[in-house]
Image (cartoon, helix red, strand yellow):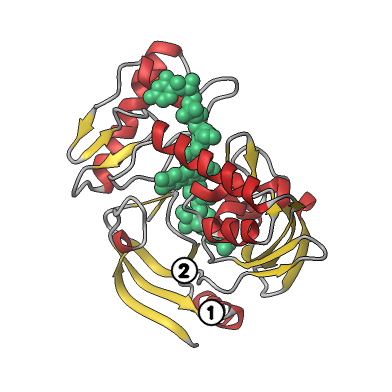
Amino acid sequence: ISGEILVNEPMSLHTTWRIGGPADLMLIPEDIEDCWAAIKLAKKYGIPYLVMGNGSNLLVKDRGIRGLVIKMAAGEVKVDEEQNLIFAPAGTLLPVVARVAADHALSGLEFAVGIPASVGGAIVMNAGAHGKSIGEVVKEVNVLDSDGELLVLPGRDLDFRYRYSNILQKNFIVTKAVFLLARAPAVEIKKRMTEFLEKRRQLQPVGKPNAGSVFKNPAGTSAGRLIDAAGCKGLTVGDAQVSEKHANFILNLDSATAHDVLTLIEQVKNAVYKKFNVMLELEVQVVG
Ligand code: FAD
Ligand code: EPU
């Protein structure tokens, strides 16, 4: 197996929250054959495995992850200008893809410029912002199924919904995506991107490690608004704090543990339930 292999690797180095104990083994595969070879070995020896992208939606527990973590690597983004298509490997960062699209006067990924996701992670979560989500521009994805078959699936087969696609449930690994975009003047695309980044800077916290929205928005309302109205802004457990700027963000002030964050999550859920009779659902994925 080629690619980078790391032993006892602190997951805090691989999550945007900068939290998480060690993974027994981490592989950053060079290509999809390495990925499958590692999974085959893991299966043969009954070793659990987890695939990750940029770790921007992961809360890894303090005891870390037993088994193998496969971190998808970034790769070259290709453009077919005639057909308005962008081809991106799963580990590539979404803002990078959005900027390549803009440079080629292709519109549709502007919303993604501030989302620190990998392409694969964004598709799994159907990441979205500013009224758009990635499912709307996915033409097709290449996935590796749990038998090692490489499948090409059209976007419409992925059952994209709010922060959901059927990929996790099917245990697929996204290896590559093709986006179908629309022609537009590059200056307009870049202007929209700047506006979206500015809006984000105004509304969302910057500076302290976080994982974006901790909870999904309940139908018809916003988790941030409910948490705020329940009086949770500034609530702190250890070094984990509900952001004063946006209540659906939990900040790692310095050396927060996963335990701090999980305790704070419970406190926030209880406060919102008590006040509004609404049970918030996690958007972040707890692993380990
Ligand atoms: P990870 O966190 O690494 O993984 C998330 C899940 O996807 C895990 O279950 C993992 O196993 C699975 N996964 C990852 N890659 C693959 C793959 N290749 N194949 C199969 N499964 C895979 N989200 C939004 O939707 N909108 C926003 O505006 C937004 N803003 C954010 C702002 C900040 C500052 C931060 C830190 C996060 C924000 N997020 C936002 C959350 C996060 O970026 C998204 O959930 C994103 O889709 C996660 O992508 P990732 O590559 O980091 O995935
Ligand atoms: N609000 C408050 N108090 C707060 C925060 C928000 O009252 O502390 C209010 C705002 O005033 C606004 C409403 O709640 O009226 C909605 O807030 P915002 O516009 O910030 O959007 P959001 O619903 O909190 C969603 C996504 C974000 C995405 C933004 C921008 C979810 C869970 N969150 O946030 O995605 O960036 O819209 O489109 O859907 C993520 O998923 O990780 C994420 C950051």
How much space separates mark 2 and mark 1, taking CA atoms? 20 Å
Q: Secondary structure at mark 2?
A: strand
65 relative to 268, above or below:
below
Mark 1 and ligand 1: say if the CB distance to the nearest ligand atom is below 8 Å: no
5 relative to 167, above or below:
below
Residue at image x 30%, y 27%?
267
Circle nearer the N terminus (2, 1)? 1
Residue 122 screen position, x and y as percent: 57, 52
Q: Secondary structure at mark 1?
A: helix
* Viewer-proximal residue among 47 and 176: 176
Residue 111 screen position, x and y as percent: 59, 44
Q: Is residue 61 visible?
A: yes
Q: Quadrant of residue 12?
A: bottom left
Residue 109 screen position, x and y as percent: 63, 50
Question: Which residue is identified by label 1?
Answer: 44
Please state if 17 lies on the left or on the right of 38 as rendered.
left
Q: Quadrant of the C terminus?
A: bottom left
Residue 206 screen position, x and y as percent: 33, 42
Please state if 14 lies on the left or on the right of 50 as rendered.
left
Mark 1: which amino acid? Lys
Mark 2: which amino acid? Lys
* Viewer-proximal residue among 242 and 45: 242
Pick out the residue farthest to the top.
275
Circle on res. 71: 2
Please state if 161 lies on the left or on the right of 268 as rendered.
right
Residue at image x 28%, y 47%?
258
44 relative to 133, above or below:
below
Q: Mark 2, residues whose alpha carbon is within 10 Å: few (<14), some, or many (≥20)? A: many
Which of label 2 and label 1 is nearer to you? 2
Residue at image x 36%, y 28%?
247
